[in-house]
Image: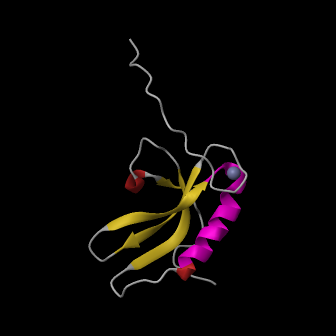
Amino acid sequence: MKPPRRFRYVPMCSQPGCDQPAVYKVAAVWSDGTSRELKNYGLACSAHAEPQTARAKRNRDLLKLQDWETVGEVRLYRFDPDLLDVDLECVSDGPDALDAP
Ligand SMILES: [Zn+2]
């Protein structure tokens, strides 16, 4: 017996004009020194992962942080609506510590 199907909202790519379902979450790890969470910069289909990542990096660089806050590199995470942010799989393979402009 299968459980009844629930209606599920399908998140879409954040790229203007794109109507594809999101495959990736664009996010950076934010921390206030005690807790960590993903700061969400948008969702992307496979075609728009690059422009969405570039946009997210610009937004991240504009972010004003308090002294106790840190934000890591913008990364792509494999989007899964069934998982919590902290359980999403990071699929970026870029350098970890580099913070090039
Ligand atoms: Zn897209």
Q: Position of residue 27 (x, y in %)?
A: 51, 63
Q: Is residue 45 magenta?
A: yes
- 55 sits to left or right of 30: right
Q: Residue at (52%, 48%) from the top-left corner? A: 79
**For residue 44, which quarter of the picture?**
bottom right
Q: Position of residue 82 (x, y in %)?
A: 42, 41
Q: Residue furthest left?
A: 34
**For residue 48, which quarter of the picture?**
bottom right
Q: Main secondary structure of the magenta part?
A: helix
Q: Position of residue 43 (x, y in %)?
A: 58, 54
- 65 sits to left or right of 51: left
Q: Residue at (62%, 43%) from the top-left corner? A: 21
- 51 sits to left or right of 68: right
Q: Quadrant of the N terminus?
A: top left
Q: Residue at (59%, 69%) from the top-left corner? A: 56
Give the magenta part as a residue range: 44-60
Q: Residue furthest front?
A: 17
Q: Nearer the viewer, residue 88 or 64?
A: 64
Q: Position of residue 95 (x, y in %)?
A: 57, 73
**For residue 19, which quarter of the picture?**
top right
Q: Quadrant of the C terminus?
A: bottom right
Q: Residue at (32%, 76%) from the top-left corner? A: 32
User: In the picture shown, does residue 89 fall above or below 73?
Assistant: above
Q: Is residue 17 magenta?
A: no
User: In the picture shown, does residue 60 fall above or below 82?
Assistant: below
User: In the picture shown, does residue 33 fall above or below 21?
Assistant: below
